[in-house]
Image: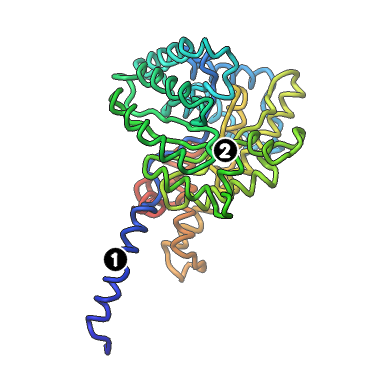
Amino acid sequence: MTLPEDVYAELDRRLAPVDAARAAAYPGERPGRQPVHTCYVPADAVVPGLAAAWGSAALAALDEHGPPDLGWDPELAGQVLPRVRAKLAAEPVEDLRVDVEDGYRRPREREDDDVRAAAAAVAADLRTGTAPPGVGIRAGSVEQATRRRGVRSLDLFLGGLAGVADRVTVTLPKVSDPEQVRAFLPVLDALEAAHGLAVDLEVQVETPQAVLSADGAVAVARLVHAAGPRLTGLHHGTYDYTAALGVAAAHQAPDHPAADLAKGLVQVAVAGTGARAVDGSTNVLPVGSRAQVQAAWRRHAGLVRRALERGLYQGWDLHPAQLVTRYAAGYAFFRAALPPAATRLAAYRGGPGAGVLDEPATARALAGVVLRGLDCGAVDDAEVRAATGMDRDELARLGRPA
């Protein structure tokens, strides 16, 4: 070696601030299970036993109109449908958002009472252990016309969960400027202090200004870093966003190219930050005749699979019968992913002599998709261990490194 130690020391000295800033801004993937969906329910429709009621309604739709005609081979359908039924009976809703924004259609003078009643219902289910794993609220935006009303509803809702919930998610809609997020953070601090529970933040990306700022910068990245570690996700608002771009109503959908562009930028912006990119909703609901329900199921299942293929592992559901295809499409995706992932993981662990030379990043992706399948119930520990020779902890060390 010919370089003296002071060359190395100077390199470390000059890059130390860069290292520290990067570690703070990009701490890595958020640990723990990501829900496959967020169910938005208007505040006046939130009652005790909501999750179980949604599961029962989904099973009833499956019995009346199903199974979904998704063009699967019989073997895959035979693997998936029993698991879907079990999921709908045991844990139909993974993440609930009480909605007092666009989905809430009652007169605003009823909002206080409806928010209090919704909080009481969620609190009752938390006490009995029947609430979804994740709960939260979407209130009004911080734009001038709605900010006081929105914060008031947050205060009432969190007050109703004080002493019962440990953690609640607040979804901030209609964000158009990073300064709105910065101004909202002290409000969340005050709510935490007042009610004694942890508050996570989600930001909805549903305005063009949230994607591209006036100076041409990618505004969504600024939103992420303005929010900091409190941010758990960026949710795309399909209909507000495409309407703002002038897309005709008949063509507003999660798979519109304009929506794809925004969600692609969201994925880049959140990568490595611990926040997650979340797909939006479809307003094509599985209701009506058998033919109408089957058509809506095919549409929803196709959108779910499309999102999964693009690395969007969470979306919105607005109707109980959408749970059928949320889980059916997801389970089919992860079950189909297991055999090839297991083969490549075995080759990766075996080294170059195994005939495949995947990089560590690819091995991380392979283990990650298996872990997501385990998290959502698409596959179980025994079959993953049989296929990969690895248990959940080994997969986590490979797929979700610190």
| Residue 84: image location, x then y, percent | 55, 29
Front residue of 80/109: it is 109
Q: Is residue 283 above or below residue 369?
A: above
- Secondary structure under tag 2 reads helix
- Secondary structure under tag 1 reads helix
Q: Earlier in the sequence, mark 1 or mark 2?
A: 1
Residue that sits furthest to the left in the current view:
5
CA distance separating discs 1 and 2: 43 Å
The reply, left or right, for residue 272 in relation to residue 304 is left
- Type of amino acid at the residue the image marks with label 1: Ala
Q: Is residue 11 above or below residue 333?
A: below
In the image, what residue occupies the spot 46% across and 13% down?
Answer: 112
| Residue 223: image location, x then y, percent | 47, 45
| Residue 199: image location, x then y, percent | 36, 31
Front residue of 359/94: it is 94
The image quarter in which residue 245 lies: top right
In the image, what residue occupies the spot 52% across and 22% down?
Answer: 99
Residue that sits furthest to the bottom in the current view:
2
- Type of amino acid at the residue the image marks with label 2: Gly
Circle 2 packing at 10 Å, graded few (<14), some (14-19), many (20+), is many
The image quarter in which residue 285 lies: top right
Q: Dot 2 corresponds to which residue?
A: 330
Badge nearest the viewer, 1 or 2: 1
In the image, what residue occupies the spot 39% across and 52% down?
Answer: 28
Circle 1 packing at 10 Å, graded few (<14), some (14-19), many (20+), is few
**Colour pattern of the rendering:** rainbow
| Residue 299: image location, x then y, percent | 70, 34
Q: Dot 1 corresponds to which residue?
A: 16
The reply, left or right, for residue 245 in relation to residue 344 is right
The quadrant of the picture occupied by the N terminus is bottom left
Front residue of 281/21: it is 21
